[in-house]
């Protein structure tokens, strides 16, 4: 087992990793920018190292500074959390060169799945169904028009190196395709430094279903069920739940078993999530995230399995401690991402938290690094914390969420709490009748929503 883990991240995920490490008896090192000197992960770590000024490129993305922090503190492993360097294959390679363990998958798997085109090819080779589309990056408009005519409109243009909803444009017909490709290329080049794009059939009302997997690199892998992440704004998840209201046990076992077998064949190490669009009873692979997900607590609540704990043990060379027969699904869990944003305009709202009172009680979990008096900095994402609830049934979980949201008080900044208080009372959400476009339509058309 490791002696000391450096956590190359900030905020609530840094605390999440720190808690798992401490429960395994492992010392922790926090790194921080000057903007985060008063952050909770810095306060609670065994050691902390400042790695630069506020801009992420000069601190949390500064690989030499992070490696130096490992050498200064004697950390023998790094957990990247999610975001920043979590899916950076070069970072994993550099750590290996310095004989520092990367708590995550092999660099080769990060590279394969980080390239959306290569990821689709790999998924197809492993028997995972994909959305119809181009076999690789499209070379020009003529090729795109030919492919789109074959698969049918509407189509969506996606950045090959994309993620987070960036570099994605929809074309409803051939007259829209050239503009969609041009816009997607510009956005992809700006966001990822790579303007390669590919084409897929645009599904009209799909759900976003993802399968949580764990592999140990020794031919063993398990799935931990699905999460439904269909409530999204601009392709960004805001509400996740498990199990999905749209699936039954047979469907879960079929797609979960397929993915677990594929991950085992790949020789995948650690935690990962295989994401699908789901429509009319069919699953279509879209991507694999080679890291722990923001929404992993949903799975932990319904399985009782500590995903980060398992990540650390696997990275240290231990085999999976669970078999598929050990995985049991109990009840339902829902997560809301509470952001420092205006609940209707979504304009970021950094600033000082004047009052902070998280909810509690049976089946309620709050993952947050915020506290009363803490200043949300303007340099990073706006996540204040995650509210996760668990119930014996989805109905019980919804009622518990409603109660917990009403208890949650954050003053001094705008947050998205009012949006969730509205959603939890909406009939479509209560009945699980939504798709990936539902929320944006709701925000545009519901005049009764008072936020």
Image (tube, grey):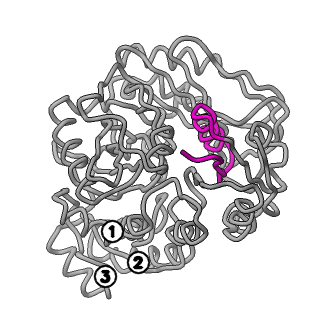
Relative to 146, does residue 129 appear above or below in the rendering? Answer: above
In which quarter of the view is residue 178 placed? bottom left
Quadrant of the image containing the C terminus = top right
Q: Mark 2 sits on what residue? A: 179
Relative to 274, does residue 57 appear above or below in the rendering? Answer: below
In which quarter of the view is residue 337 placed? top right
Q: Is residue 417 left or right of residue 93?
A: right
Q: Residue at x 61, y 69 (%)?
A: 98
Front position in the image: 396 or 8: 8
- Mark 1 and mark 2: Cα distance apart in space: 8 Å
Helix, strand or loop under label 3: loop
> In the drawing, what numbered circle is on residue 171?
1
Q: Mark 3 sits on what residue? A: 138
| Camera sees residue 416 | no
Q: Nearer the viewer, mark 3 or mark 1?
A: 3
| Camera sees residue 92 | yes
Relative to 332, does residue 157 appear above or below in the rendering? Answer: below
């Amino acid at each position: 087992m490791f002696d000391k883990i450096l956590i190359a991240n900030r905020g609530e995920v840094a605390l999440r990793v720190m808690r798992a490490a401490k429960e395994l008896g492992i010392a922790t090192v926090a790194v921080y920018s000057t903007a985060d000197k008063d952050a909770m992960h810095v306060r609670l770590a065994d050691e902390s190292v400042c790695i630069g000024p506020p801009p992420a490129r000069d601190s949390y993305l500064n690989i030499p500074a992070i490696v130096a922090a490992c050498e200064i503190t004697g950390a023998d492993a790094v957990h990247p959390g999610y975001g920043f360097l979590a899916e950076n294959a070069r970072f994993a390679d550099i750590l290996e060169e310095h004989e520092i363990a990367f708590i995550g998958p092999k660099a080769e798997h990060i590279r394969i799945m980080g390239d959306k085109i290569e990821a689709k090819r790999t998924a197809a080779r492993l028997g995972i169904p994909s959305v119809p589309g181009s076999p690789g990056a499209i070379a020009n408009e003529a090729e795109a028009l030919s492919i789109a005519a074959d698969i049918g409109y509407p189509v969506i243009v996606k950045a090959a190196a994309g993620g987070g909803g960036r570099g994605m444009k929809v074309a409803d017909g051939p007259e829209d395709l050239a503009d969609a490709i041009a816009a997607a290329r510009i956005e992809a080049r700006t966001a990822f430094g790579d303007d390669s794009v590919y084409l897929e059939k645009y599904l009209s009302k799909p759900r976003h279903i993802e399968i949580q997997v764990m592999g140990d690199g020794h031919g063993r892998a398990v799935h931990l069920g699905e999460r439904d992440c269909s409530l999204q704004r601009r392709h960004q998840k805001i509400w996740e739940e498990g199990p999905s209201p749209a699936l039954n046990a047979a469907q879960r076992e079929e797609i979960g078993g397929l993915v677990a077998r594929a991950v085992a064949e790949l020789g995948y190490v650690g935690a990962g999530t295989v994401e699908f669009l789901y429509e009319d009873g069919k699953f279509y692979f879209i991507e694999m995230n080679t890291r722990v997900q923001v929404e992993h607590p949903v799975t932990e609540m319904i399985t009782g399995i500590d995903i980060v704990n398992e990540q650390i043990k696997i990275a240290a060379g231990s085999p999976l401690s669970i078999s598929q027969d050990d995985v049991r699904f109990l009840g339902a869990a829902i997560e809301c991402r509470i952001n420092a944003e205006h609940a209707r305009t979504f304009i970021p709202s950094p600033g000082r938290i004047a009052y902070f009172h998280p909810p509690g009680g049976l089946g309620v979990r709050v993952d947050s690094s915020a506290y009363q008096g803490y200043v949300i900095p303007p340099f990073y994402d706006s996540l204040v914390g995650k509210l996760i609830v668990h119930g014996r049934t989805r109905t019980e979980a919804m009622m518990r969420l409603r109660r917990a949201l009403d208890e949650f008080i954050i003053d001094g900044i705008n947050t998205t709490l009012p949006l969730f208080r509205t959603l939890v009372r909406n009939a479509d959400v209560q009945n699980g009748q939504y798709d990936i476009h539902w929320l944006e339509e709701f925000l545009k058309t519901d005049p009764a929503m008072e936020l």
